[in-house]
Image: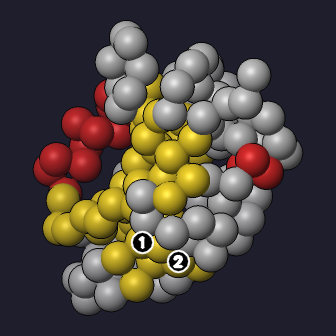
Amino acid sequence: MTITSQAFKNNEFIPKKYTCDGKNISPPLTIRNVPKNTKSLVLIVDDPDTSGGTFNHWIAWNISPKKHQISEGEKGKFSEGMNGFQKQGYFGPCPPSGIHRYLFKIYALDSQIDISEKSQKDLLQSLIQNHFIQSATLSGKYTRSR
């Protein structure tokens, strides 16, 4: 399974448009080679470079395994939970200083997830462990100009 973006290549800089300094909308994503027995996909976007530990920017679940594209700024076709800013849905890169990495990790699961859209990453991750098939990661970078 792979996850890529038309907006940036793996380990390259994420365009400003997808950050708190731009339109703060989610980038377009492409998911390929999803395992045949997958019932749903989960997406988790994290910044592992914060001083307080990993910071979550987006959790989305019950993404159809037949959905090979998540369009720029797409909403409503899957469930979204609360990010680290305590807002539902995507919140783009917004590092306080320096270059930070942003990991877009897609998980293939053998079932759907039944949780509230007020849920946070910890609950979602605990459920992933019991239904995990395969995962893939896309890494982007961002730094704010001062």
> How far apart are labels 2 and 1 at the CA level?
6 Å
Label number found at residue 23 = none
- Identify which amino acid the numbered label 1 is placed on: Ile
Task: Evaluate if marks 2 and 1 touch, with contact meaning CB atoms under 8 Å apart.
Answer: yes
Element on which disc 2 rests: strand
Amino acid on which the number 2 mark rests in the picture: Thr
The disc, 2 or 1, on the residue closer to the chain's N-terminal end is: 1
Q: Residue 3: x and y, percent?
A: 42, 71
Q: Residue at x 34, y 60 (%)?
A: 137
Asked whether residue 74 is in view, the answer is: no
Q: Which residue is mark 1?
A: 3
Residue depicted at x 85% and y 45%? 23
Mark 2 sits on what residue? Answer: 30
Residue 35: image quadrant is: bottom left
Q: Residue at x 43, y 41 (%)?
A: 101
Of the pair 23 and 63, the residue shown nearer to us:
23
Residue nearest the observer in this picture, 120 or 135: 135
State the image coordinates of residue 111 (x, y, percent, origin top left): 29, 64
Q: Indicate whether 42 appears above or below 21.
A: below
The N terminus lies in which quarter of the figure?
Answer: bottom left
Check disc 1 and report its element: helix, strand or loop: strand
